[in-house]
Image (tube, rainbow, N blue to C red):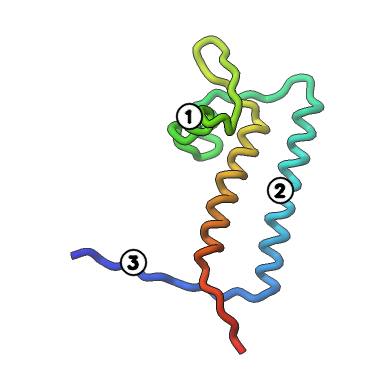
Amino acid sequence: MEEKKKEAYVLIGVERMEELLKTQFMMSQSVLLFEYLCSQSRYPLFLSAKSACEVLGLNPETLEQCRRKRTIRARVVGRQFLYNAYDLVALSCKLNQRKIQRVLRNIPKFVVR
């Protein structure tokens, strides 16, 4: 028999929600700061596809798909693709943002009076 997954709901207060949104904003600002630092550097950081997948926790198929869709740029050096560190961080944020939005859309909304 198949076991049904139980749905769990967590109520959080307005203050906690505001704190989570502020944290998300600070993280996005950190990405912008990282972008600025990478653009000012004479020697930008590059990672191989294998290293990028390890660091960001992506599977190689996702990275390959993003490269083919031109969501992320890659440089070919020798026989391997190298990815700019900033582009990888931006890709990771974009993928995680979609997950967060999907979860928030599915959260039931109700008011306790």
Work out which quarter of the rendered image holds the C terminus and state it: bottom right
Residue ID at (51%, 16%) = 80
Label 2 vs 3, first from the N-terminus = 3
Residue ID at (75%, 47%) = 29
What residue is disc 1 on? 64
Is disc 1 placed on a helix, strand or loop?
A: helix
Label 1 vs 2, first from the N-terminus = 2
Q: Position of residue 17 (x, y in %)?
A: 66, 68
Q: Residue furthest bottom?
A: 113
Q: Position of residue 112 (x, y in %)?
A: 59, 86
Which of 47/98 is in front?
98
Q: Quadrant of residue 109?
A: bottom right
- Above or below, 26 relative to 89: below
User: Which labelled disc corresponds to residue 28?
Assistant: 2
User: Which labelled disc corresponds to residue 5?
Assistant: 3
Work out which quarter of the rendered image holds the N terminus and state it: bottom left
Crowd rating for badge 3 (residues with CA inside 10 Å; few <14, some 14–19, many 20+): few
The three-letter code of the residue at mark 3 reads Lys
Q: Position of residue 10 (x, y in %)?
A: 52, 73
The three-letter code of the residue at mark 1 reads Glu
Crowd rating for badge 2 (residues with CA inside 10 Å; few <14, some 14–19, many 20+): some
Q: Residue furthest right?
A: 40
The three-letter code of the residue at mark 2 reads Ser
